[in-house]
Amino acid sequence: MATTQYNPADVEAIVREVLLKHLPGAAVKPNPLVVNISARHVHLSQEHVEMLFGKGAMLEVHKTLYQDGYFASKQTVMVVGPRKRMLSDVRVLGPCRPSQVELAFTDAISLGIDVPVRISGDHHDTPGCVLVGPKGVVELKAGVIRAMRHVHMGHADLEHYGVKNGDAMHLRIESFGCTTVLENLVVRADPKVKLEVHIDTDEGNAVNLDAATKVELIKPKECGCHKHSGNNNGQLTTNMSVVSRQLGVI
Ligand SMILES: [Zn+2]
Ligand SMILES: [Zn+2]
């Protein structure tokens, strides 16, 4: 009996064509855009896991995350700030890696820590804290950050959006009464990841992400004047600090 052989590439092309016909105006994205809120959490080295949870302790999977191989563990720790203020039950994410605490600004304010915005893993000039587990205590000398908002991208996404690792993008979130464009979304390229944006709870709540009706990634337009290659935010930062001081006086 004769069978018809289908070339997978042809089938994919047909599917794309059909999808395009049904979604007029929609660009063909290689992957769906997923935006997730990354609530405050802790990463721990295996050494710190054992100091906090006992010799031989391993992180156990509580819930798998969107990215393959990553999980929220069953373990939680207490994060203690400089004036003994604390956040209890902060979730540990696995697998193990160098210890780091990621907080939203609201969390950091309640802990009394002046937290800097850093790309995950960049601990230069960052504050520390004390972590308390059921079997022990760890004093981190550094590594408390507010993670810079970012988008994880694989090859196909980099190509589709025309960006590279370390570039900044905009994320526009359409949400009733609070539509917002978040700038400085850092591209973090890795061939093994799925397309996913991570923002924190402050950002997610500000845009009412749960009720958002549209999210889109936008590549910023280059002005072409070559003056803006470095950090040109100095003047803006100065003005902003004056504004906040004036508000403080009022
Ligand atoms: Zn993290
Ligand atoms: Zn992330």
Image (cartoon, rainbow, N blue to C red):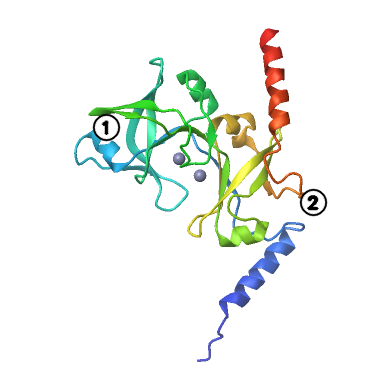
Q: Along the horizontal axis of the image, is 130 left or right of 224?
A: left
SS for callout 1: helix
Indicate which disc residue 224 carries. 2
| Rendered location of residue 131, percent (x, y) | 34, 27
**Image quadrant where residue 233 sits:** top right
Q: Residue at x 60, y 76 (%)?
A: 9
Q: Along the horizontal axis of the image, is 216 left or right of 105?
A: right
Q: Amino acid at mark 2?
A: Gly
Q: Is residue 3 above or below residue 71?
A: below
- The answer to which of 129 and 231 lies nearer the viewer is 231
**Image quadrant where residue 8 sits:** bottom right
Question: Who comes first in sequence, dot 2 or dot 1?
Answer: 1
Quarter containing ligand 1? top left
| Rendered location of residue 87, percent (x, y) | 41, 23
Indicate which disc residue 52 carries. 1
Q: Few, some or many C-alpha atoms within 10 Å of disc 1 (few <14, some 14-19, many ≥20)?
A: many
Q: CA distance from mark 2 to mark 1?
A: 52 Å
Q: Residue at x 73, y 30 (%)?
A: 235
| Rendered location of residue 96, percent (x, y) | 34, 44
- The answer to which of 125 and 67 lies nearer the viewer is 125
Q: Amino acid at mark 1?
A: Leu
| Rendered location of residue 203, percent (x, y) | 60, 32
What number of labels is visible? 2
Q: Which dot, 2 or 1, sits closer to the camera?
A: 2
SS for callout 2: loop
- The answer to which of 151 and 216 lies nearer the viewer is 151
Q: Is residue 93 visible?
A: yes
Tell me: is circle 2 under 8 Å from ligand 2. Answer: no
Q: Few, some or many C-alpha atoms within 10 Å of disc 2 (few <14, some 14-19, many ≥20)?
A: few
Q: Residue at x 53, y 91 (%)?
A: 2
